[in-house]
Structure formats: structure tokens, C-alpha cells
């Protein structure tokens, strides 16, 4: 029994379940903002499960393709089941394929018609982009990997909106853009901490290629862009004035964004004295709070409708 539970947990590790959980959360935010099925669990659960399976399949393939790199990185060689030898490559590939098929089947069967097929196409794009284009081509070749590679991690709102509405709109595109702009400062803060690990594995992350000073400068630049983008997001979602439509979101975006901005600036001007992991953890709190605020504002709008 212990071995079975350990094997099941290793399968869960292959999905990178914490990261995949964020995709579910941002996907549900799009469902809440779209509004028609926000509280209809019977209608939305296939979409949420499909989001988990999408992330799980992409992340499993990512670890299959990066097995040799993970085996030399201190952060991953014992934590991840493939380099540690707890799961075989063949088992991992089958696990990824089953998740991929299950995600497509869930969407197509649960949402017949345009809704399911549009969401399924976005799922296919997400898995192919992350597993093949990002993992095999982009990540090993250039330090801009995180910038361009942020697309799959931001797809949750687009997939969920498509499954609910059968089309895309400015609202999920704006959510996608916010996650996309947030990804570089979030990941680079971690990459500075793991600089030596990435260098050992031959992965050209920004701190390895350009150094810590340039990385902190880029973190600040992208934080400025992200902050401006976060305040512009209500343009896509507002019904009436900004403040009437998104009071909780705008309040948090302003306050938490200023904290993020000041922190990124201090990290740059005081380099390399300040540790970056606290900013990395704060960035998770930041994006979670903003998407939670969108859910709260959407619920408020529904009550007032």
C-alpha cells in the first residue's frame, strides 16, 4: 500500500501540481467573470479537471524531455521521480498521453459543439507549445525563453472562457496578458537563486547569460510593464466606470503593484545584497490576490445585476 501511494504521489509530482493548480484558479476566474456558469459546479467541473490534465500532460512531457538536465540540478535530481529513478520514462510518457487524451475527451463530451472543440484546440496548442517548442527548442537556446515561454502558463483563462462561451473575448485575453507579463519577474527572481544549478545543466537562463545585475534590471523593467498592464486590465472587463466595475481589483492592483514595483527597484539598485526568494514568494501572493479580486468583483456585479 505504501508503495502504491508513493507511486501515485510521484505521478502527481510529474504534473507539477502546484503550478497546475494556478492554471485551474485563473481558469475559474475567467468562468466567474464570464458569469453564466460561475456557481454551476455540475457544468464547470469538466473544464477545471481538463485544465489540470492539460497542465499535467505538458509538465510530464517537460520532465521527460529534461531528464538529463534534471539529473544534474540539485533542485530536481532527487525531488523529481524521473531522475531519481522512481518512475520510468515509458511510464511517464504513457501518463502524459493519457492525460492529453482525457483532457480533450472531457471538453468535447462535456461541451458539445463549438465550446468543446475550441477549448480542445487551445489545449492542444498549450501542450504542444510548452512540451515541444518551449522545452525542446526555446529553453535550451536563448535567455528570452521565459518571456516567450510564458504563453502556456497564461492559457487557463482562454481555455476556460472558450469552454463556457464557445468564443474568445477581450476579458480572457486581458487575463492572459496579465499572467504573461507577470511571468518574467516571477521566474527571474527564482532563477537568480538557482543560477548555479542552471549553469550546471547548460540552461541559458538570464542570470547565467547576462548576470545578476542585468537580471535585476530586467525584473524592474518588466514589473513596470506589468504594473501598468494590471491597471489597464479593467478596460477589457468594465461595465460602466472602472471603479464601479472593479473596485476590489483596482485597489489591490494599485497597492500590491506599488509594493512589487518598489521591491523590484530596491532589488535592482541594491544588487546583489538583497535576496530574491522573498520577491518570488510575494509575486505568487500578488497574482493570486489579483485573480481572487476579479472573482469578488464579478460576484458583486452579478448580485447588482
Image: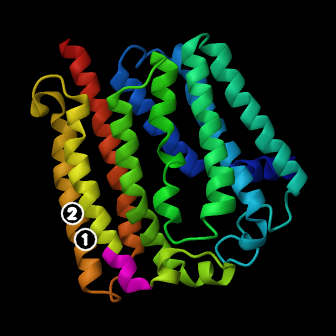
- Does residue 146 sit above or below 276 in this rendering? above
The residue drawn where x is 49% and y is 17% is 166
Residue 270: image x %, image y %?
26, 86
Magenta run includes residue 222: no
Nearer to us in this view, 242 or 43: 242
Q: Is mark 2 in CB contact (under 8 Å) with mark 1?
A: yes
Left/right of residue 137 with respect to residue 29 in the rendered view: right
Residue 300, located in which quarter of the rendered image? top left
Left/right of residue 108 with respect to residue 232 in the rendered view: right
Residue 155: image x %, image y %?
50, 40
Secondary element at image label 2: helix
Q: Mark 1 sits on what residue? A: 263
The residue drawn where x is 45% and y is 83% is 210
Nearer to us in this view, 225 or 69: 225
Nearer to us in this view, 77 or 210: 210
Residue 209: image x %, image y %?
51, 82
Q: How far apart are the alpha carbons under marks 2 and 1?
A: 6 Å
The residue drawn where x is 46% and y is 32% is 158
Q: Which mark is residue 168?
A: none
Nearer to us in this view, 23 or 136: 136
Secondary element at image label 1: helix
Q: Which mark is residue 259?
A: 2
Residue 64, located in which quarter of the rendered image? bottom right
Q: Residues within 10 Å of mark 2 (few under 14, many from 20)?
A: some
The residue drawn where x is 60% and y is 65% is 139
Residue 8: image x %, image y %?
78, 46
Query: Can residue 40 be seen in the rendering of this structure?
Result: yes
Query: Can residue 77 be seen in the rendering of this structure?
Result: no
Q: Which residues are magenta?
A: 211-217
For the stretch drawn in magenta, the main secondary structure is: helix
Amino acid at each position: 500500500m505504501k508503495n502504491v501511494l508513493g507511486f501515485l504521489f510521484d505521478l502527481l509530482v510529474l504534473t507539477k501540481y502546484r503550478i497546475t493548480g494556478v492554471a485551474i484558479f485563473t481558469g475559474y476566474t475567467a468562468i466567474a467573470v464570464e458569469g453564466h456558469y460561475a456557481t454551476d459546479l455540475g457544468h464547470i467541473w469538466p473544464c477545471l479537471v481538463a485544465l489540470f490534465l492539460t497542465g499535467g500532460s505538458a509538465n510530464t512531457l517537460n520532465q521527460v524531455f529534461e531528464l538529463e538536465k534534471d539529473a544534474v540540478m540539485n533542485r530536481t535530481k532527487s525531488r523529481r521521480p524521473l531522475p531519481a529513478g522512481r518512475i520510468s520514462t515509458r511510464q511517464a510518457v504513457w501518463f502524459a498521453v493519457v492525460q492529453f487524451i482525457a483532457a480533450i475527451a472531457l471538453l468535447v463530451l462535456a461541451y458539445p459543439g463549438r465550446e468543446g472543440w475550441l477549448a480542445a484546440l487551445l489545449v492542444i496548442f498549450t501542450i504542444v507549445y510548452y512540451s515541444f517548442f518551449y522545452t525542446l527548442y526555446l529553453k535550451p537556446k536563448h535567455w528570452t525563453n521565459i518571456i516567450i515561454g510564458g504563453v502556456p502558463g497564461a492559457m487557463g483563462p482562454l481555455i476556460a472562457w472558450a469552454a463556457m462561451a464557445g468564443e474568445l473575448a477581450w476579458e480572457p485575453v486581458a487575463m492572459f496578458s496579465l499572467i504573461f507579463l507577470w511571468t518574467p519577474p516571477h521566474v527571474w527572481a527564482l532563477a537568480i537563486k538557482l543560477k548555479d544549478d542552471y549553469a550546471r545543466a547548460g540552461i541559458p537562463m538570464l542570470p547565467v547569460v547576462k548576470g545578476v545585475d542585468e537580471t535585476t534590471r530586467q525584473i524592474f523593467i518588466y514589473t513596470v510593464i506589468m504594473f501598468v498592464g494590471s491597471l489597464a486590465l479593467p478596460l477589457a472587463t468594465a461595465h460602466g466606470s472602472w471603479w464601479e466595475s472593479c473596485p476590489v481589483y483596482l485597489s489591490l492592483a494599485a497597492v500590491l503593484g506599488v509594493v512589487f514595483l518598489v521591491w523590484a527597484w530596491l532589488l535592482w539598485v541594491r544588487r546583489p545584497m538583497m535576496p530574491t526568494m522573498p520577491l518570488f514568494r510575494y509575486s505568487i501572493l500578488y497574482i493570486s490576490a489579483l485573480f481572487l479580486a476579479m472573482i469578488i468583483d464579478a460576484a458583486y456585479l452579478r448580485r447588482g445585476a
